[in-house]
Amino acid sequence: MLPLTRFWLLLRRPPAAGVRGKNLGLRKVASGVSFPGNASPRALNIFDRDLKRKQKNWAARQPEPLKFDYLKEEVGIRIADRVYDIARDFPLVLDIGCGRGYIAQHLNKETVGKFIQADIAENALKNTLETEIPTVTVLADEEFLPFRENTFDLVVSSLSLHWVNDLPRALEQIHYVLKPDGVFIGAMFGGDTLYELRCSLQLAETEREGGFAPHVSPFTAVNDLGHLLGRAGFNTLTVDTDEIQVNYPGMFELMEDLQEKKSRMLT
């Protein structure tokens, strides 16, 4: 059994007097995709972003993507449902860490005018799913968004931000590119993700080695998220925690799935 914790963020910035949204455009940044040396100096570099880009590119080339992308599909549907819950339309939308486009395929042109899909992996962008919404793909890193201030009416992100080294910086950039009345809806793995697996590995390694090392990527505690969002400038926060349980017939099926998710999402 593989428990997965999911949380959603619905955020609005208060209107700012005299501030208007700008047309879509790229601002100058060090690089649209981060490479060694581009990381934020204040962040612990837990993840090698260049290696993650290569892993995601490798995963995007594998056959049978639906066999391993069921979580991305499920969460993409639920994020789209949250968008429909908001009684307004969104002329310009940004999807951060879009992968193959798991959110856009569930939205319609009556709600979204134009959809910008950004991802660190070029192969993922080449394989984006078809949608009725006019779509543009941009090669960009979640840690270095190359967009102007007050650009987007809505920013969405599905199971991507847990790979970011500096989450506060990433949230600040999302706030920066949103219009004053913009909305951010996201989902990422919470702190209890893979709880049973982590406990089993720790107990087994402690018994045999006298100690243990982490074998699963760290996840943000849900209780810390509201503070991080508030510090980034968001208000009117709604945070929900849910749990998706995935059952496996045996150990080997679990290991096969995790091996593929090592490049796609989890570790």
Image (cartoon, rainbow, N blue to C red):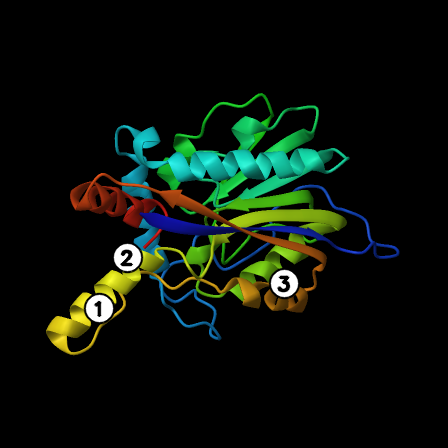
Cα separation between marks 2 and 1: 10 Å
Which residue is more in the foreground, 154 or 261?
A: 261
- Residue type (three-letter) at the residue carrying disc 3: Leu
Residue highlighted by disc 3: 229
Quarter where residue 71 is shown: top left
141 horizontally vs 84: left or right: left
- Residue type (three-letter) at the residue carrying disc 1: Leu
Structural crowding at the residue carrying mark 2, measured as other residues with C-alpha within 10 Å and reported as few (<14), some (14–19) or many (≥20)? some
Dot 3: element: helix
Question: What x and y, as percent, mark residue 131?
Answer: 54, 23
Residue at (39% x, 67% y) in the render = 37
Q: Are marks 1 and 3 in contact (CB under 8 Å)?
A: no
Residue at (57% x, 63% y) in the render = 225
Quarter where residue 173 is shown: bottom right
Choose the circle earlier in sequence order: 2 or 3. 2
- Residue type (three-letter) at the residue carrying disc 2: Leu
Residue at (59% x, 60% y) in the render = 171
